[in-house]
Each structure stands twice: as C-alpha cells, then as structure tokens.
Image (spheres, rainbow, N blue to C red):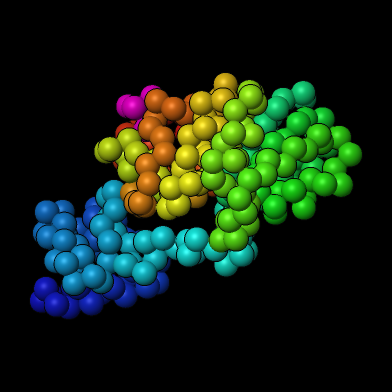
Amino acid sequence: MFVEERHQEILRLLQENKKVYVKELSKRFQVTEDCIRKDLASMEGQDLLKRTYGGAVLAESLHPGHSNQVASRKDQNIKEKQAIAKKAVKLIQKGDMIFLDTSTTNIELAKEIVKADLKVTVVSCMMDIAEILKAAKKVKFILIGGEFNRSQNGFLGSLTLQMMENFRFDLSFMGVVGVDLQEEAIMTYVPEDGLMKQHAIKKSSRTYLVMESRKFGFSANYVYAGFQDIQGIICEKLPEEKIVQTLKDKQVQLL
C-alpha cells in the first residue's frame, strides 16, 4: 500500500471511530509503529488530525462539543456522562458538602444526587445545576454568584472567587477538556473557569475529575491542576491499557 493510500485509510477510520491508535494501525497495515507515528505527524502537519497519547483524533474533533457553549454540548455523549455520574455519586456520603463546577457531566451528577435522595449540601456556580437541585428536598443548595458567563451558563470571575473563599468542601467534582499524561496537566479552555476550579480544589479535602476516557491526550488552553492536586479520575470505561498503566505508575486512582 502506498503512503497516500494509507493516509486515506487512516482518515476513513478516524471519521468512522473518532480516534485511531498507533498499535492497532501498525498491525492493520503491517508496518512498524515508528512508521505509523511518521504518518500521523505528516497528517498533523496538513491539519488533517491531531496526535494524542498513543494515537490521533480528527482535527475538528480535538475538542468535541467544546465550543465554550454549554448549551451546545450538554446533550452530547449522554450515556457516557450518565455512567460517570453513577460512579461519582457512590463517593458521596450523607452530610457531605460538595462542589460541582460548570461541567456538563456534573449536570448528570446533580440528577444522580437527587435520585439517590442524599441529604447533602451542594455548592455550585452553574445555573443548569441550580435548576435541577432547586426542588430537591434533602439537598441544601448554595448558588455562588458573580459575573454571569453565558457560554458556561454560570458565574465566573473575581466576585465568584471571593464568594468561594470561606467555603471548605468534603468533595469536589471537576470537568475536564483534556489531560496530558506526560506533562501531568489537567486542562480547560476558559482561564476564568480554570481559576474557579483551582480555587475549589484548594478548598476541597478530595477532588475527582469527571471525564470521558477519550479525553486522555486532548489538550486545551489553560492548565488548572496537576495529578498532585486530585485524588482520582472517574471515567465511563477503562481507557487503553497503556493509559491505565501510566496512571498507576503516577499513583492516580482510576474509577
């Protein structure tokens, strides 16, 4: 198979599966993994894809659904987000004070908290979460204000940080745009969102990332935390074995 033909087939597989892996492509085309890495590097140079940890994603799907508009992505990948939320809610104990950031996965977690009939306190700056919890009889809900950010459908900025200052959380759950395993970088897009997340992490006894497994290797503009700042990562399914082993080596709990 010519190089151009291999590139076309890689693109087809990307469009079909959203992501490809070096090891699988190497076996499929019966070439070395180094050869595949050169293919992906060449294709990235043409803006056809973006290389990620162990593989690649389509260039336009590097930040799938992340147009910085919550409304455009909260109905995407619902099954995955629900699976994550069902795992996350099991970490919550009666009487806990919990922080939920402006994450579409945390919208599903708020629903699970209501279903579980938990007597807890939830603090958030996201309007979608407020809408879900406003009628929950056992949940004491605190909405943190500040400057309204329409894209996040929540409150961000210096006033929000000031209002958070005196809180102490038992648990916080953080949304993620991407995680770079080599740099140990946890990322988001909006700096104000990142600052809010940083502030909440410092006020929390335990912090867990709620993220779809496909986000390993994705990147974004603003690093808001490292692995030393979190207790674990909650995914809808196990990522590839190489990622599992890397997290184990870095002593990051994977749920």
Number of numbered discs present? Answer: 0
Name the residue at 44% across, 27% down. 229
Determine whether 104 is above or below 57 in the image. Answer: above
Q: State the image quarter where residue 50 is shown.
A: bottom left
Q: Which residues are magenta?
A: 247-251
User: Is 4 one of the magenta-colored residues?
Assistant: no
- Left or right of 91 on screen, residue 68: left
Name the residue at 38% across, 32% down. 226
Q: Locate the N terminus and report the quarter of the image it occupies.
A: bottom left
Question: Where does residue 160 sit, x and y in percent of width and height?
Answer: 60, 40
**Nearer to the camera, 244 or 177:** 177
Give the farthest residue toward the right.
137
Q: State the image quarter where residue 136 is shown.
A: top right
**Most frequent secondary structure within the magenta stretch:** helix
Question: Where does residue 107 sit, x and y in percent of width and height?
Answer: 66, 50
Question: Where does residue 194 sit, x and y in percent of width and height?
Answer: 46, 43
- Left or right of 38 on screen, residue 180: right
Question: Where does residue 238 sit, x and y in percent of width and height?
Answer: 46, 43
Name the residue at 34% across, 27% down. 250
Name the residue at 79% across, 45% down. 133
Determine whether 14 is above or below 172 in the image. Answer: below
**Nearer to the camera, 84 or 17:** 84
- Left or right of 108 on screen, residue 184: left
Q: State the image quarter where residue 39 is shown.
A: bottom left
Instruction: Report if residue 105 is visible in the image.
Output: no
**Nearer to the camera, 92 or 155:** 155
- Left or right of 105 on screen, residue 31: left
Instruction: Report if residue 132 is visible in the image.
Output: yes
Determine whether 14 is above or below 242 in the image. Answer: below
